[in-house]
Amino acid sequence: MDVIAAVEGSVNTIGYGLAAIGGAIGVAIIFSAYIQASARQPESAGYNRTWLILGFAMAEALALFGLVLAFAVGG
């Protein structure tokens, strides 16, 4: 039985790692889109900053949900 518990812990760790990678990729895409939009239209940077923060918060929330799920399934 101890081997099964160890495998479950490893699977949870791998699952959270994948969730963190997904969040990091999402944040990178969001920031790159903001930089491109600001470079093309500098006067709209203030308006786009609102959407940047909203998108960043949502992408990070998904990574945090992955962390919570790893603990919930593991415990």
Image (cartoon, grey):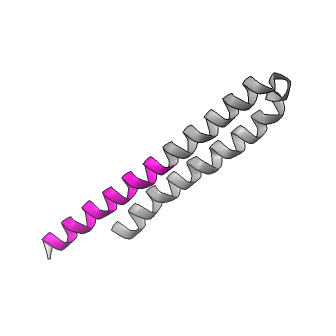
Most common SS among magenta residues: helix
Q: Position of residue 64 (x, y in %)?
A: 51, 53
Q: Position of residue 75 (x, y in %)?
A: 35, 68
Q: Say which of 17 and 3 sits in front.
A: 17
x 14%, y 71%: residue: 2
Asked which quadrant contains residue 55, the reply is top right
Which stretch is magenta? 3-22
Q: Say which of 21 and 35 sits in front.
A: 35
User: Is 65 left, or right, of 6 in this rendering?
Assistant: right
User: Is 54 left, or right, of 7 in this rendering?
Assistant: right
Asked which quadrant contains residue 27, the reply is top right
Above or below — where is 66 with respect to 5?
above
Q: Position of residue 3 (x, y in %)?
A: 14, 70
Q: Is residue 75 visible?
A: no
Q: Is residue 65 visible?
A: yes
Q: Say which of 33 and 70 sits in front.
A: 33
Total marks placed = 0
Could you tell me which quadrant the N terminus lies in?
Answer: bottom left
x 33%, y 62%: residue: 12
Q: Position of residue 32 (x, y in %)?
A: 62, 33
Residue furthest to the bottom in view is 1
x 44%, y 56%: residue: 67
x 39%, y 62%: residue: 71
Above or below — where is 18 with respect to 51?
below
